[in-house]
Image (tube, rainbow, N blue to C red):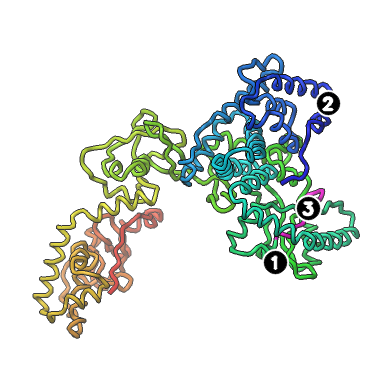
Amino acid sequence: MPSYLPSTNDLFTRFATKECALIQQAITLVESCEDVEPNRPHGLDVALNLLALNVGLETILAAILSDPRLIDYPLDIEFGPVVASLVTNIKELNALKIYSKNISTQASQIEILRRMLLSTTDDIRALLVKLAYRLARLKKLAQEEQDIRHFIAQETLDLYAPIANRLGIGQLKWALEDYAFRYLEPENYLFVAKELESKRVHREDCIEAFIVQLQQAVSSGDMRVEIKGRPKHIYSIWQKMQRKKLPIEELYDLLAVRVIVQKTAQCYEMLGLVHQYWISIPKEFDDYIANPKNNGYQSLHTVVLDAGNNRIEVQIRTKEMHDFAELGVAAHWRYKEGSKQDIATEKSIASLRQLLEEQDGHALLENFHTELFADRVYVLTPKGQLIDLVKGATPLDFAYAIHTDVGHRCRGAKVNGGIVSLTYQLQTGEQVEILTGNDIAPNPNWVDPNLAYLKTPGAIQKVKAWLRLQGQDKHLGMGQQLLEKEVQRLRPKSDYQAKLLQHFNLSDIEKLYLALGRSLINSRQLNYALLEIEGKKRKTKVKKAAPIQANKLDISVAGADNILTHFAQCCRPQIDDDLKGFISHSNGIAIHRADCENINKLSEEQKKQVFAVSLKVDAT
């Protein structure tokens, strides 16, 4: 956590005289109000947290004036409509009570809450103030009871720190995480803090020696660089210890250096220099300049070994990239329009404003979901319950997400009051109503991927499970009849059932009946298994040459003689003719003479058409 805390003097030295007068006016207005909740942060506390983010006057004023002590005051006259609108937005965010102790235990709901929170934000600066308010709340949390401390700290890790990360505001993210970790796991927090302090001298010596050597290497050229040690954050260290199952002394990136250069090309030049003087670990190299993170973060990361065989992480970036990594969307106001960081910021802000339609290619994984949002859609039931579905989900997926029985009985759907097909792709924010029938009757077509009725694997499995159970009695009977017929014909030994179950790797005779009845095991396989049990060899019938009859020829296709074929009536192929085959839609392969006009008139496109087919493979 930062050792230096900004004061009111820092606030006034930042702005011009005229602007300071407005700030003082806002502070005076708020201080004149009665303080009914002394444990809650004041607007000035929030504004001081925003100083390091280099925000503008309007944001500072909005932070001060969003003080809970100030109620129903007409701000637009004295401070302008923009500030008044920001304050309204901030207070709406503060009034949002969607998080509860019950919900906090449901990991599947946390992402929904993040999105709903972000979707309420009309001006991204309101969200910056909200995050700064949460940090101020954490700083005063020691005055609260244990239950409240734990709840607010957990809410911070689940909700606010990931939002700060998504906005790219590293400073706020790290501070929020460390304060929350301190209250959630005080013993582990103190353990990491003490370990860092005990090894501090060794770390500082290693880093200082590395920096001196790197500065000497750089001094021979004309590159202007800034090299400094990179601060480590207690919660991120603890997370890495848990994730990698390593003791703290084996974490290589406790030794870290950051190099700031002037131009992007110099980042790669510096990388080459570092790899020239130190042995690098290739698997630890990441190029986030060529492949920025989704929140706009850019930097080169590499890990090298120093003379003492210590692993040192080196981050290389430009000043612009560095400011953006530290400040995220707040850096938007520091750079001219059209710069790469400005474009990344606009993209981030746009994605937040349209967050419910965002498509992020990364899953929500470690470090409380480093890349925050996955490929999801969020739709509502008629009663307003929020349902989380995979992108591309249909009303039928929605029905199965509500309840298996609703899915099985689904006959139609309405979206925003209008009838839609069951293959309609749902969009975030839509309200979905399922029309059900009395009978449970899933359609076998629903599991056909080419028809796109279902997208979610869980829903597909539910339909398949139901279909497998249907007609079970019928299949049992059919399978039993087939087995009895073969047994009567071949008359195997009395213990044939046990040997058949062993042969087909089945646990009981009913499963064998079902497999036979559903043609999962065909009669040829059964016949072979029974003969093998008896130790008999299959008899191979040798075909005798038959007199040539019209349309009666032995045909093999690619060496196989059991393929459905028929002879075309247009050219009537005969023995010794050169033949061509064409796959028909319903009657196997049509056999033509090679010189047949009809087949030769087919276009190449017709000959090469691709069709979706169902295949069944019998392996004996």
Report helix, strand or loop for mark 3. Answer: helix
Of discs 1 and 3, which sits in the foreground? 1
Q: Nearer the viewer, residue 491 or 4?
A: 4
Indicate the amino acid at tag 2.
Ala
- Please name the residue that numbered disc 1 is placed on: 281
Report helix, strand or loop for mark 1. Answer: loop
Residue lying at 68% horizontally and 22% vertically, measured from the top left: 83
Q: Quadrant of the C terminus?
A: bottom left
The quarter of the picture where residue 204 lies is bottom right
Indicate the amino acid at tag 1.
Ile
What is the spatial separation of the Cα atoms under label 2 and label 1, in whole angstroms?
A: 49 Å
- Please name the residue that numbered disc 3 is placed on: 265
What is the spatial separation of the Cα atoms under label 1 and label 3, in whole angstroms?
A: 22 Å
Q: Nearer the viewer, residue 498 or 209?
A: 209
Indicate the amino acid at tag 3.
Ala
Is 273 situated left or right of 480 in this image? right
Q: Nearer the viewer, residue 378 or 525?
A: 378
Is 309 situated left or right of 160 in this image? right
Most distant residue in the left direction: 488
> Counting other residues with Cα less than 10 Å from the Cα at mark 3, is it few (<14), some (14-19), or many (20 or more)?
few
Q: Which x, y percent locates residue 141?
A: 63, 39
Please say if 333 is above or below 515. Answer: above
The quarter of the picture where residue 329 lies is top right
Magenta-drawn segment: 253-266
Report helix, strand or loop for mark 2. Answer: loop
Q: Which x, y percent locates residue 208?
A: 83, 60
Q: Counting residues from the N terminus, which is met first, the one under dot 2 or under dot 1?
A: 2
Q: Which numbered dot is residue 16?
A: 2
